[in-house]
Amino acid sequence: MTIQPIEVTVNGRARRIDVAPHHTLLEVLRDDLGLTGTKECCLVGECGACTVLVDGVSVDSCLMLAVEADGATVGTVEGIATGDRLHRLQQAFLDTGAAQCGFCIPGQLISAQALLALTPHPTRAEIEEGLAGNLCRCAGYEQIIEAVQAAAAADPAASQGAAER
Amino acid sequence: MRAFAYERPATLADAVTVLGDGGPDARPLAGGTDLIIRLRDGSIQPRVVVDLKWIAELDREIRDGDDRLTIGARTVMTDLAADRRIRREFPALAEAAAVVGAVQIRNRATLAGNICNASPAADTAPALLVYDATVLVAGPGGSRQIPIDAFFVRSGVTTLVRGEVVTAIELPRAASSPGAVHLRRTRRRGHDLASVTLACAVQADGTTRLAYGSLGPRPVLVTDVTGVLADPAAPERAKVERLDTLFVAASPSARSMRASPDYRLAMLHVLGLRAVGIALGRLADGANAR
């Protein structure tokens, strides 16, 4: 089996890793880099538990080979918080009780982050559409939507200008 | 997933050579949202996967021409759905692209991949059929153009020959834009494959083009030249009868679990009539806008 060296920046840290061509980005993140926040679930691109950002856009990491991420910037749930300070989305998920079993939450957070980056103040319909690729089998959708609304309302860029993040 | 080699050709010529040499043992990779599922479930077991995303000649631009828009082979659904020109002149295609999978899928899935995968339920296929798109192809025998209606054969099979790669998809710009719409039926809101997927374009000259998918081995284009469907004053009964005639060849599979054949046929007629009404309204709105 051939091994392919790739260069990828994960959560701000540049990495050079050797990957097998048939290993997905999901497998490499979890098994080679130990970033187990990104979850493996349906493996057919329906549940969104494996959602990560690649060059700023959300993708299902189970449907992308790791070699395809060569040269890319990857963001996972481990990179959302700043040190000990939770991201406003994480705080909002806690505050609204959006996490029940918690398994889908890393993917929900990444999709919500991608949504707010494009649409800082989404309507409810836009949140539903933005998170349509993330299933929650605890059916905590109402709280998840509330959390995204709360995080959007807490956007520091909206109240203080774009000075802070 | 079974191991395979990975090739990343930098030129179209190299990609054509690798794919031509490999034949069925080589599989092209664009967005991967269909391919990787099949690699994982073992339904395909190629020796080599050929990543087309590093080829200089293949881009993800949508280029303006006087008489056409050219969509680069690497254009993804998200970009297609958001493009102002596509939304204005080819709304049925923008609407179809906007309902493929969910955000994560649309960020990766390409238009070219959607047609090459040749699923009977491919959402963009009916829109491309009513807009009379042309598929630009490069291969061992040089480049050629395939009318979209001559591209689909059956599920998973197209008229591409060994070594051929789709380089772009062209949409002809009509002198006057038709009124057009894409509609579909799914089991649930959000993220699902279509039980019926349908596009309709009503032209100012009275011709109505309808195309439907998920009701047989390939998406099907039908054309009404009688003017009945395009006539805002024609009674609904006449339109229903016209649609009955046009949709006579629809043959949904009984094996699909998404919906029964009877349901699909019933919904085809419902969506067809609804689409004609919306397309007519849009044609009138477009005429008013001019």
Image (spheres, helix red, strand yellow):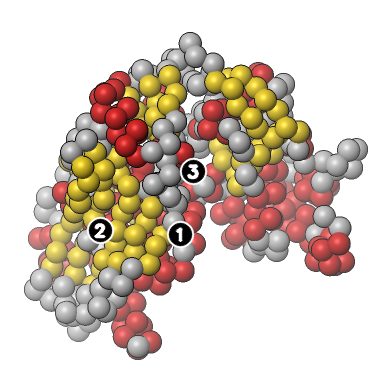
Mark 3, Cα crowd under 10 Å, few <14 / some 14-19 / many 20+, is: many
How far across and how far down the image is residue B220, in percent? 19, 51
Residue nearest the observer in this picture, A67 or B42: A67
Which residue is painted at 22% across and 31% down in the image?
B162
Question: Is residue B93 placed above or below B58 in the rendered structure?
Answer: below
How far across and how far down the image is residue B185, in percent? 36, 53
Residue B97 image-quadrant placement: bottom left
Q: Amino acid at mark 1?
A: Ala
Q: Which mark is residue A128?
A: none
Dot 1 falls on which chain?
A: B
Question: Is residue B152 placed above or below B63 in the rendered structure?
Answer: above
**Is residue B219 in view?**
yes
Residue nearest the observer in this picture, B182 or B165: B165
Q: Which residue is mark 1?
A: B81
How far across and how far down the image is residue A134, in percent? 59, 42
Q: Which residue is mark 3?
A: B108
Residue nearest the observer in this picture, B164 or B38: B164
* Tags 2 and 3 on a common chain: yes
Q: Is residue B151 left or right of residue A135?
A: left
